[in-house]
Image (tube, coloured by chain):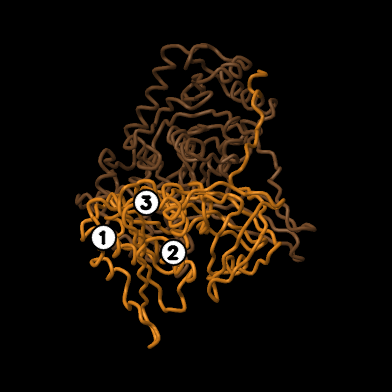
Amino acid sequence: MNDHAAAVITHEGLGGLIAGLRAEGFRVIGPRLRDQAIVYDDIESVADLPAGWTDEQEGGHYRVRRREDAALFGYNVGPHAWKRFLHPPLLRLWRAERSADGMTVTATSEPAERYAFLAVRSCELHAIAIQDRVFLQGPYVDPHYKARREGAFIVAVNCGQAGGTCFCTSMNTGPKAEEGFDLSLTELLGDRHEFLVEVGSERGAALLAAVPHRPAERQDAAQAANAVARAEGNMGRHMRSDDVRELLLANLEHPRWDDVAERCLTCGNCTMVCPTCFCTAVEDENDLAGNAAERKRRWDSCFTMDFSYIHGGSVRSSGRSRYRQWMTHKLANWVDQFGTSGCVGCGRCITWCPVGIDITEEVRAIRGEGGSDGRA
Amino acid sequence: MDRLGERAPVMAPDAMLPLIARVARRVRELPDTWTLDLVAADGGPLMRYAPGQFTMMYAFGVGEIPVSVSGDAADQTRLVQTVRAVGKVSEAVTRLAAGDTLGLRGPYGTAWPVAEGYGRDVVVVAGGLGLAPLRPALYQLQAERKRFGKLVLLYGTRRPEDILFRRQLANWRRQLDMEIEVTVDHAGAAWRGHVGVVTRLIPRLGIDVDNAMALVCGPEVMMRFAASALNDIGVPEEAIHLSLERNMKCAVGLCGHCQFAGSFVCKDGAVMRYDKVRRLLGLKEI
């Protein structure tokens, strides 16, 4: 196998990839236009992809709009992250039943889906790698994540443009997908609308071999490189990240935390859209007779009061402490816990914050580099 | 193409799945505090654990809470845990009678480093129910008494009637060659012991501070002042160990709730060294 050996496919070839994955029993998930947003959902064919759509993103602002061309991957990232499939928002863990001499507990028996993800951005590949560290590489493994992750087939897509809140170049997570995929696509827009395909695994090569393709020529590679360079050049945001851990840990009592607390609604949107936020709560559901109970796990957010509740009250009762918790965890303490930043620069937390709080701007303010405008 | 499908999803064992334990004995310690002796549902031993570790106790249909082990780790025939009824789960757990079952996961977390005290003086400082997580360490100090220098237990509670393990304290005082000082916040005329916070007893400690170890467990504010007072009299920060409390849901470092700056209290604690947490304890809402 020649790693990253490039080929070129057309819409027909892309359709073949989707059909091939479906024929192999994968549930193919990819971008679709739904409810005025580009979300990740089941894909049956190329016709399901958001042809000719892009998104416009700013702090607290997201709109889809028409492109002038028919690009299939001409948007950036939407409100969904792949974690909703690998680390489901709601999951039944086990069921307890009363028995003659006490109780029995039965593990959930629902089989995990075999997913194929289509159009995973470089920042998202990094986010998946970060969640791999959280769920697979510690002293305890999350078996639910493991079952979903291990078989997953990943088709990456390189960005040909950056969104208004993107800053992957600052976090060294893109825009070019370098590893962690089975196949990687770069959309070649022009007279011939095609896709450059790079191979990242043997099973990727096997899938590509089964669909119509031609070898990539030098100009195809050059056009793909240009597309990525274009994305690299128009990042909507920037953040100096080399010393951000030390910066934040040295400023846990900075007045800026009060300032951001004035604006933050503690709604938790940033944690829901973040592709790496992993916190969960557990809750019990009982049947009316009280003979059976189900334990469920659901996404939780460090912005809720319940999150840090211990007998007597919440440890972090102020909005100031909760925003500080989230941001210092993401950018600083994550490094101590998992050997990597928890931020991939996807910009979702900026876009989906209802009041447009901008993590890059907050870092700049703590750094003492004024300028209330978070734009690059 | 067949290689695409080589890997079907497989579920590994789930750390979130409890085993079933049975209450062998239930003892009332205080009006709201009970000690449960637990065995496996079939009557056999449950789990091996070290002093300072905790389990997740599940009351059927109500929920799950972290509870420190309060028994003797050398006695692996039963798991002893002391629970105060302060919420709906702990209320349900303390209502369990002998023969009842509950779910149990663990043991989890770090242990009191009792062996580090060999050849040294050992000070144990407990506040309120904090005596329960320290009791396994006291059992070990008792079992290996000759290996330690001077032993001191400083114990503070709100009122004389809140003193936990009262008879055992009297026995230890008699048999263990251990100095035991009990202090209360409020007392009636019948109380002849100390009154005031436990930290006030620390400056009077007659120990070899350069060669001492301290184990501290209680409310966070009490631990902060106690550790600081111990350090003030010369006990090195690295020789002071605290047991921290945060919200714990999974106990295996995956749910995020018990985060304490760069640590997860469930797996990096609950027992942590003072030099690692001193700065954070001085900040609010970490």
Q: How far separated are the C-alphas under marks 1 and 2?
A: 23 Å
**Where does label 2 land, which residue?**
B172
Which of A145/A60 is in front?
Answer: A145
| Residue at mark 2: chain | B
- In screen coordinates, is A37 left or right of B261? right
Dot placed on the residue nearer the N-terminal end, 1 or 3: 1
**Where does label 1 land, which residue?**
B230
Find the residue positioned furthest to the right.
Answer: A100
Q: Position of residue B17 (x, y in %)?
A: 63, 48
Query: In the image, what residue type sits under mark 3?
Result: Met
Q: Colour of chain A?
A: brown
Task: Give the structural element (helix, strand or loop) at label 1.
Answer: helix
In this rendering, which labeled residue sits more in front, label 3 or label 2? 2
- In screen coordinates, is B222 left or right of A51? left
Residue drawn 60% across the image and 14% down it: A209
- Regarding residue A68, the answer to whether it shows in the image is no
The residue carrying pointer 2 sits among few (fewer than 14), some (14 to 19) or many (20 or more) residues within 10 Å by Cα, namely some
Q: How far separated are the C-alphas under marks 3 and 2?
A: 26 Å
Residue drawn 63% across the image and 39% down it: B13
Query: In the image, what residue type sits under mark 1?
Result: Leu
Task: Give the structural element (helix, strand or loop) at label 3.
Answer: strand
Circles 1 and 3 on the same chain:
yes
Dot placed on the residue nearer the N-terminal end, 3 or 2: 2
Q: Could you tell me which quadrant the C terminus of chain A lies in?
A: top left
Dot placed on the residue nearer the N-terminal end, 1 or 2: 2
**Where does label 3 land, which residue?**
B272
**Residue B6, relative to residue A130: is it above or below?**
above
In this rendering, which labeled residue sits more in front, label 1 or label 2? 2
Q: How far separated are the C-alphas under marks 1 and 3?
A: 16 Å
Q: Which chain is orange?
A: B
Which of B151/B248 is in front?
Answer: B151
- In screen coordinates, is B150 left or right of A288? left
